[in-house]
């Protein structure tokens, strides 16, 4: 009697699906019951009325979706993969998307791939890309950027959508700021991080509005062979001679995948995992501020043996007295270094916020510099490079 009752009930359900479109909502609890208790019955219903069943995947429990996925329901596998991705359980998600990916619809493949990109699951994205399974779209463009493919391989429409420049020819210096900064990166994550830096800076410009203007992010692929495996991030700027540079810029921010942040010759090297506070710390180096932790021994040999104010935040008391209120600094091992405040500052601990005292020192340094800031063009000249600097109407070679 129980078997007959189940068969009869299933038949009624199927008839209701065939003849009454409004029966979909009434079908949900019954289908969920059969999916959970009698998979074979649920599968029969699925193959007779898949469009109705597909509506239920969002409300089914994981255990019910697993039963359907094991019975080759790719939509159930897709929902499971998405749920685990949203829970940051990437191993569990992969168990459901990898075997079924080819069976997903194009829209499902796009959505899942984009979720993998947002989660920075680059090994999985590379698996799909190298296997030729990654569909054309935003996720594939992101993968090409992360793989440091040449700018010519990036879709211009995608670049425009992402507010990304594929060459320096489209960026221009602004007359609204005292310093113009080229924002450059060699990989996908760097694009998003630099855009976040710009957005945060625009909300609270430092040390004051009109100090720095930043370009949209320029993607340069692996043109400068940046590497940070051995500690500090370094790039091969010898290749700069082969690159076209826009006129009117003072500094460069070059973002790569790894390596400790540093400033050298008007160029900030920084990786895409570092915080905005680190970016602000390095930005102050552009205007001559020194670190307030122990300086490198090679730097101490010449800097710590000077006399007087050698940086906005560093005084060397060699046979002279420090300014009133200044305190001992650990920057120099000869114990003759002084800093403006007894408190920790952003120049000693990069996670510190910018204090009002250091903001005023920064603004004073911009208006009345102790020394002239080093521009990247001057650094290129120091390296013996003579790259081409261009404007919309002319081009000439830099000369020292």
Image: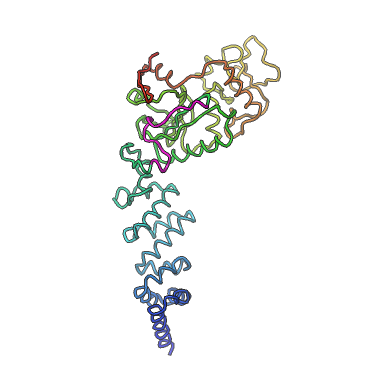
Residue at point 38%, 24% (across, down)? 391
Residue at left offset 32%, top offset 25%: 242
Q: Residue furthest left?
A: 132
Q: Is residue 264 above or below residue 217?
A: above
Q: Quadrant of the N terminus?
A: bottom left
Q: Residue furthest right?
A: 324
Q: Is residue 349 left or right of residue 88?
A: right
**Number of numbered discs:** 0
Query: Closer to the camera, 187 or 171?
Result: 171
The percent position of residue 285, horizontal first and vertical second, equals 53, 24
- Looking at the rendered image, the quarter that the C terminus falls into is top left
Instruction: Identify the image quadrant of residue 256.
Output: top left
The magenta stretch spans residue 9: no
Left or right: residue 187 versus residue 312 is left
Compared with residue 143, is residue 325 higher up or lower down, i.e. above or below?
above
Q: Image quadrant of residue 19?
A: bottom left
Residue 166 colored in magenta in the image: yes
Which is nearer the eye, 330 or 384? 384
Most distant residue in the bottom direction:
1
Q: Position of residue 305 (x, y in %)?
A: 56, 13
Percent position (x, y) of residue 147?
35, 41
The magenta span reads 159-176
Question: Relative to the observer, which residue lies in front, 143 or 391?
Answer: 391
Residue 379 percent coordinates (x, y): 43, 19
Q: Residue lying furthest front in this view?
A: 393
Which of 129 and 48 lies nearest the eye of the viewer?
A: 48
Q: Residue at x 37, y 78 (%)?
A: 18
């Amino acid at each position: 009697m129980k078997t007959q009752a189940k068969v009869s009930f299933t038949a009624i359900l199927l008839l209701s699906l065939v003849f009454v479109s409004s029966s979909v909502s009434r079908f949900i609890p019954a289908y969920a019951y059969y999916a959970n208790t009698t998979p074979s019955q649920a599968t029969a219903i699925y193959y007779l009325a898949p469009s109705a069943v597909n509506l239920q995947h969002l409300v089914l429990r994981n255990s019910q979706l697993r039963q359907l996925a094991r019975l080759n329901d790719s939509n159930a596998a897709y929902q499971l993969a998405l749920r685990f991705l949203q829970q940051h359980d990437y191993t569990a998600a992969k168990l459901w998307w990898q075997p079924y990916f080819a069976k997903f619809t194009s829209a499902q493949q796009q959505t899942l791939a984009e979720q993998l990109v947002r989660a920075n699951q680059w090994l999985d994205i590379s698996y799909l890309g190298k296997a030729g399974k990654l569909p054309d779209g935003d996720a594939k463009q992101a993968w090409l950027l992360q793989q440091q493919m040449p700018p010519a391989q990036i879709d211009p429409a995608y670049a425009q959508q992402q507010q990304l420049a594929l060459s320096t020819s489209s960026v221009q210096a602004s007359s609204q700021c005292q310093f113009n900064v080229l924002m450059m990166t060699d990989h996908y994550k760097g694009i998003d991080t630099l855009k976040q830096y710009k957005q945060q800076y625009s909300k609270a410009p430092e040390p004051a509005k009109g100090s720095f203007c930043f370009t949209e992010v320029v993607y340069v692929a692996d043109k400068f062979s940046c590497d940070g495996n051995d500690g500090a991030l370094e790039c091969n700027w010898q290749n700069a001679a082969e690159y076209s540079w826009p006129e009117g810029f003072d500094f460069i921010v070059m973002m790569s995948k790894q390596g400790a942040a540093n400033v050298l010759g008007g160029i900030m090297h920084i990786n895409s995992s570092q915080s905005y506070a680190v970016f602000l710390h390095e930005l102050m180096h552009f205007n001559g501020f020194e670190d307030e932790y122990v300086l490198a021994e090679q730097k101490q040999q010449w800097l710590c043996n000077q006399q007087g104010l050698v940086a906005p935040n560093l005084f060397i008391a060699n046979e002279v007295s420090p300014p009133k209120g200044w305190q001992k600094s650990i920057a120099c091992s000869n114990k003759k270094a002084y800093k403006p405040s007894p408190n920790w500052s952003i120049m000693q601990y990069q996670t510190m916020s910018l204090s009002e005292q250091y903001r005023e020192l920064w603004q004073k340094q911009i208006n009345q510099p102790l020394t002239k800031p080093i521009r990247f063009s001057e650094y290129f000249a120091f390296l013996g490079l003579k790259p081409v600097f261009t404007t919309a109407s002319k081009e000439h070679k830099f000369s020292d």
